[in-house]
Each structure stands twice: as C-alpha cells, then as structure tokens.
Amino acid sequence: MELLLDLALFFIIGLASGVMSGTFGIGGGSIRIPLLNIAGFPLITAYGTNLFVIPFSSSMGAYTQRKNVNWDFAPYVILGGIFGSLIGAVFAGLLDPVILAFTFVGVSILTVVGINLSQIHPELADKIEATRVNIVGGTFFLNFLTGIRGGSGGSLFPAFLKTMKVDIREAIATSLIATIFTASTAILVYWYRGNIDLWPSITVLFGSVIGSRLGSQITLKIKPKWLEIGLSVLVILLSLVVLIKTLF
C-alpha cells in the first residue's frame, strides 16, 4: 500500500511539473526538483530524477510547438548547452547540498531577470545582439549553472533567447528542442554516479509526459505577457522552498 501511495505521489509530481514544462518551456526542473525534494529525495537524487525525465517530456512539448521553433538559433543553443551541461553535471557531484541550494536560487533569479530584462534595464537589452558566438557562449555558461543544479538549461533558455529578441513563444519552443540534447548528456554523468532511482524516475516520467502535452496546448492559448509573469513568480517561489528546506 505504501509503495502504491509513493508511486501515486511521484505521478502527481510528474504531472504537475509536466504541465509547467509544456506551458513555460522550462524543462520542468524548476518545478520537479523542489517537489521531489519536499517529497524526501536528497537534492542530488532529485537532480538525477529530473534529468531522466526531461528528454521525454521536452520531446512531447517540442512536437506540439514544432511550428514555433527558431531553427536559425536552435543548433547553436544545443551546441553551447551540451558542453555546459556536461561540465556542470560533473561539478554537481562535488558540491555541498547547501551550495547546490543557493545555486538553485541564483539560477532562478537569473531566469526572472532574463525574462524581464527589457523592462529592468532596457539599455542593456538593446545592446545584446543575437550572434552565433553570443548564443553558443551564453548557452554554455547558463547550462553550466543549470547543470550544477541538476537541470538541462530549460529554466534559462527561454529567458536568454528573449534577451536575444526572440518572441517568447519561439523561445519556449526552441528551449524544448535544446533541452532534449542537453539533458541526455547530463544523464550519463548522473547515471554513472548512481544518482538516478529508476522506478520513481519512470513514474515521474509517465506523469510528466502527460502533463507536458497538456501544458503545450495551454501555452498556445495564453497571452505572452501572462506566460512571462507566471514563469517568473513560479520559479522564484519554488526556488525559495528548496533553499528553506535545505537550510532548516
């Protein structure tokens, strides 16, 4: 009975994070990791479970939003993201949980700043150019940070692409495509270290795929302004939950 309740909880976590992933194009980690951590997973195991799910849930969301993918930028986002994800995943296994928690909050703040940069600092936003070097370099650095906190770059890619003057819907769809590759790279590191608990991960995956499909349909009906506000609030609140739980 206890096993069934645990599996039901993992499914609900997957479903909720999948909806958020498909709606906001964030790979789901900003939602899934805090929920798994609250459910009792050590932070590093929550990271591994999150990464296990991302390629599948992102594939579902990317297929639904395939017409919005910016194929001019996607290859460079993937290139920079893969190398950043690989190095960040290695570092994640070497750091103290408290440092991981603070990194999680820092990445969440960067996400919100990137989404709203044109309002926070319009002069800086105007100076940013969408060159190949900027995209590869930017996604490498961002995915290094998200790799440390067990992510695939999906929480920062939409914000980053938005600063590159990409429409928010195109940014979300392109992020979903990129995270398929960046998460798959990091999974190898986490699997080797033994940070992926298989059956809970499969259950979370099942819920996430269903949720991602629902979320991708939702995002097509929501105005970009509300997508930006919703993503900003959600990411900050859940990152604070992780930090508080780790510290206290």
Image (tube, helix red, strand yellow):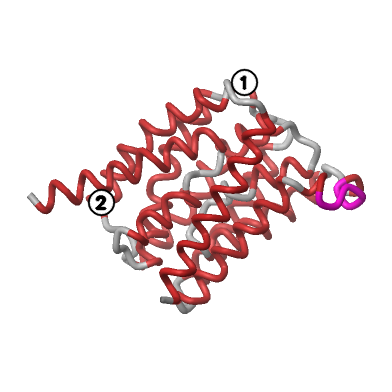
State the image coordinates of residue 184 (x, y, percent, origin top left).
46, 48
Query: Which image quarter holds the C terminus?
Result: bottom left
Residue 170 appearing in the image: no
Percent position (x, y) of residue 99?
Answer: 52, 76
Q: Nearer the viewer, residue 213 or 1?
A: 1
Q: CA distance from mark 2 to mark 1?
A: 33 Å
Per the picture, the main secondary structure of the magenta-coloured stretch is helix
Residue 201 colored in magenta in the image: no
Amino acid at pointer 1: Lys
Residue found at the very far left of the displayed protein: 1
In primary-sequence order, the first of circles 2 and 1 is 1
Q: Is residue 212 left or right of residue 85?
A: left
* Corner quadrant of residue 56: top left
Queried whether the magenta region covers residue 122, the answer comes back as: yes
Q: Residues within 10 Å of mark 1 (few under 14, many from 20)?
A: few
Q: Which residue is mark 1?
A: 67
Residue 25 picture location, percent across and down: 56, 38
Answer above or below: position of 114 versus 230. below
Q: Residue at x 68, y 60 (%)?
A: 141
The amino acid type of the residue labelled 2 equals Pro
Q: In the image shown, does 107 or 178 lie closer to the viewer? A: 107
Instruction: Estimate the x, y position of residue 172 in percent, counting from the top left.
Output: 62, 35
Query: Which residue was labeled with disc 2?
Result: 200
User: What residue range appears in magenta?
Assistant: 120-125
* Relative height, residue 145 to residue 159 (above, below): below
Q: Could you say which is closer to the camera, residue 237 or residue 161? A: 237
